[in-house]
Amino acid sequence: DVVWFTESLPQDVLQAAVDAVSACDTFLTVGTSAVVYPAAGLIDLAIQTGARTIEVNLDPTDYSSRVDISLRGRAADILPDLID
């Protein structure tokens, strides 16, 4: 599915994301500016619930200093190494 700017996430989709983040051990954020809410708020939730947080992005975000690991580079280059 696609959610365009100015559109809201369907409530059931957002609730499912909140439930999943609340229960996760590791939260991976990839290629986001981390400024569009409510999705960006999931990073806060992951931090608050004690999940290990990993950011993969070309540029720093407001969360770069708050996550456990912040990796700079292209997702296509970094993600295969994380999987290995």
Image: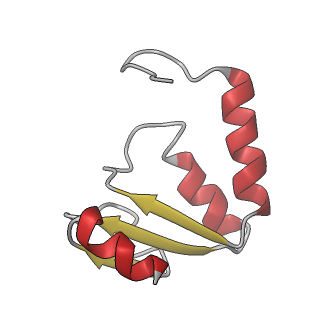
Does 28 sit above or below residue 35? below
> Is residue 64 among the parts visible in the rendering?
no
Out of 36 and 28, give the one closest to the viewer: 28
Horizontal side of 25 relative to 2 (left or right) equals right
Residue 53 in picture, x, y percent from top left:
54, 73
Residue 15 image-quadrant placement:
top right
Does 37 sit above or below residue 48? above
Residue 45 image-quadrant placement:
bottom right
Horizontal side of 70 relative to 41 (left or right) equals left
Out of 32 and 48, give the one closest to the viewer: 32
Identify which residue is drawn at 70% across, 74% down: 50
Question: Which residue ends up furthest to the top in the rendered image?
Answer: 7
> Is residue 82 among the parts visible in the rendering?
yes
Out of 63 and 24, give the one closest to the viewer: 24
Residue 35 in picture, x, y percent from top left:
37, 44
Residue 72 image-quadrant placement:
bottom left
Residue 80 in picture, x, y percent from top left:
37, 74
Horizontal side of 8 relative to 72 (left or right) equals right
Residue 71 in picture, x, y percent from top left:
31, 77
